Amino acid sequence: MGKKGNHSNNGGLAFCMAKIGGKWKPIILFRISQGVNRFNKLFDEIEGINRQMLSKQLKELEKSGLLTRTLFPEIPPRVEYAITPLGKSLLPIIKSMEKWGQKQQEGPVIPKTTSTQQLPLFD
């Protein structure tokens, strides 16, 4: 069966990656889930990101429906970000990624094979 638009055998994965793919989006969502909901605080806590990239990623997450942005009419203006229910549905995946990364930093986990038989290189 041929490809139709964005639909393919990996359509669900491709859709998910379009929403949270890249280096920064999962980290931003994770930090906001931990209560870091202001731009400057996010900037301070996310090592390696620049202000322009953080702003771009926050706008994309908002456009995707994963975050909301609330502007408080104060002087100076205050903006806070919050995770939407759709964004919250991604948190178990992001938290699993975080746990996996922590384990790998401790030392890679190499699965043990149950069979000692080698497959022939050539028939």
Image (spheres, rainbow, N blue to C red):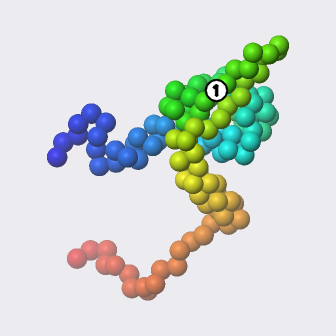
| SS of the residue under disc 1 | strand
Going 77% across and 21% down the picture, which residue do you hit?
78
Going 51% across and 32% down the picture, which residue do you hit?
65
Image x and y of residue 115, in percent: 42, 85
Quadrant that contains the C terminus: bottom left
Please tell me which residue lies in front, 89 or 7.
89
**Dot 1, crowdedness within 10 Å: few (<14), some or many (≥20)?**
some
Q: Quarter-wise, where is residue 2 in the image? A: top left
Res 99 seen here: yes
Image x and y of residue 40, in percent: 78, 28
Q: To which residue does mark 1 refer? A: 69
Going 67% across and 31% down the picture, which residue do you hit?
81
Q: Which residue is at the far right?
A: 75
Image x and y of residue 116, in percent: 44, 86
**Vertical comparison of 44 with 112: above or below:** above
Please tell me which residue lies in front, 84 or 40.
84
Please tell me which residue lies in front, 87 or 51.
87
Going 75% across and 30% down the picture, which residue do you hit?
38
User: What type is the residue that disc 1 sits on?
Assistant: Arg
